[in-house]
Amino acid sequence: MQRRTMLGALAMTSLGASASAAAQSASGTAPAAPASPSTATASPASATHATGATPSPPNALCYIIWPADGTVITGGKLWVRMGLRNMGVCPKGFNRPNTGHHHLVLDSDLPPLDQEIPSDRNHLHYGAGETDAHLELPPGKHTLQLLLGDYNHRPHDPPVYSKKITIVVR
Ligand SMILES: [Cu+2]
């Protein structure tokens, strides 16, 4: 978010520079052309982040619809319902703006957010674009957290993830 704001400020600055260059050319000799390249370089910079991560829109929100934090599950079978606001769910491999697919982080902290999300029993990918998932968990406490990944299974910038919740299986 902060980076986006800074880029916005830079764009404003270069616009201001081109405006003053235009004013100079109007009053006399200097052509306005030199101001154009700096304006042009600002646009690609705001579309692609320095890390190469896919940008996420402001207000993107990923959340677990069900179960609620603290839910007790008898028998260990449950459906997890995955929610996403201000972005769309898209299967892996399709690079569309403001989309991604869900990953469930199970009994683990979030993985590194600047790398491809691992694929193992603690990091489950829903690359077909699923928004609910059937789980069977052994008795005990379990934590669940959602992390959205882009078409290449990489977290967005800024990353889009839910709160971590704890459920109990009896
Ligand atoms: Cu994935």
Image (spheres, rainbow, N blue to C red):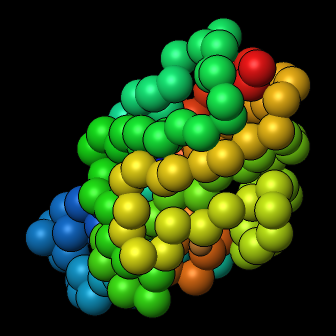
Residue at 65%, 14% (x, y): give it: 72
How many numbered markers are drawn? 0
**Image quadrant occupied by the N terminus:** top right
Residue at 52%, 51% (x, y): give it: 134
- Of residues 112 and 102, the one drawn nearer to the viewer in this rendering: 102
Residue at 75%, 60% (x, y): give it: 123
Where residue 12 sits in the image (x, y, percent)?
36, 51
Name the quadrant where ligand 1 sits: bottom right
Where residue 85 sits in the image (x, y, percent)?
31, 40
Residue at 83%, 29% (x, y): give it: 139
Asked whether residue 77 is in view, the answer is: yes
Q: Residue at the front extreme?
A: 75
Where residue 142 sits in the image (x, y, percent)?
80, 30
Residue 51, quarter of picture: bottom right
As drawn, 129 above or below 3: below
In the displayed structure image, the side of residue 103 where residue 63 appears, left or right:
left
Residue 90, quarter of picture: bottom left
**Image quadrant occupied by the C terminus:** top right
In the displayed structure image, the side of residue 31 where residue 132 appears, left or right:
right
- Of residues 29 and 14, the one drawn nearer to the viewer in this rendering: 14
As drawn, 46 above or below 113: below
Where residue 55 sits in the image (x, y, percent)?
48, 62
As drawn, 125 above or below 65: below
